[in-house]
Image (cartoon, rainbow, N blue to C red):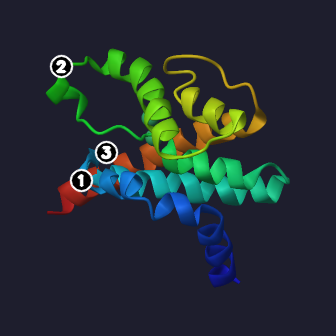
Amino acid sequence: MKIRRYAQYLNTVKDVITSPDIRRLEKYDQHMGTSRLSHSVNVSYKSYRLASLLGWNAPAAARAGLMHDMFYYNFKEVGFTAREHCRIHPQIALYNARQSFDISPLESDIISAHMWLAAGKRPKYKEGYLVTMVDKYCAAEEFFKGIFKKIRR
Ligand SMILES: [Fe+2]
Ligand SMILES: [Fe+2]
């Protein structure tokens, strides 16, 4: 059952998850030792599952989940403050996603509004609310996993 779910998910995001522009995210660290690629897959898969259970647009949630943090820098290295980074990176991710893929207005909105509550605009669609909440959940999960890993060492 689980294997069938993974297969359906992979089939939905095949073109995105295999793209070199998404694979490049592996090189960047996100949330205490998780790569940006792992974080994006985590957000994408959980959003896909929840949207499927709710009967919402699961492919759009899955695809935008993979693209939502499509930026290729570490914010401290480029001189952004944390606040500036929170506000700016959804727009950079949207720009990069448009360069690499054909994306729908729903997917665009999910990407550009994923920092809602921390910074930026409110999502226009229910799938956007779902992805922004899943993103926050995954960030917290990854952060605490990273902390516990450090403590155990
Ligand atoms: Fe983000
Ligand atoms: Fe994220």
* Residue neighbourhood size for the residue with mark 2, other residues' Cα within 10 Å, grouped as few (<14), some (14–19), many (≥20): few
- Residue at (64% x, 68% y) in the render: 9
Residue to which mark 2 is pinned: 79
Whole-number angstrom distance, CA of label 2 to CA of label 1:
19 Å
| Residue 107 x/y as whole percent | 65, 39
Decide if ligand 2 comes within 8 Å of the CB at mark 3.
yes
Residue to which mark 3 is pinned: 30
Q: Nearer the viewer, residue 37 or 152?
A: 37
Whole-number angstrom distance, CA of label 1 to CA of label 3:
10 Å
- Residue at (42% x, 52% y) in the render: 39
Q: Earlier in the sequence, mark 3 or mark 2?
A: 3
23 versus 129 height, above or below: below
80 versus 57 height, above or below: above
Q: Quadrant of the C terminus?
A: bottom left
Mark 2 residue type: Gly
Whole-number angstrom distance, CA of label 3 to CA of label 2:
17 Å
Residue to which mark 1 is pinned: 27
Mark 1 residue type: Lys
Question: What is the total number of numbered labels drawn onto the structure image?
Answer: 3
Q: Quadrant of residue 145?
A: bottom left
User: Seen in the image, is 123 located left or right of residue 138?
Assistant: right
- Residue at (63% x, 83% y) in the render: 3
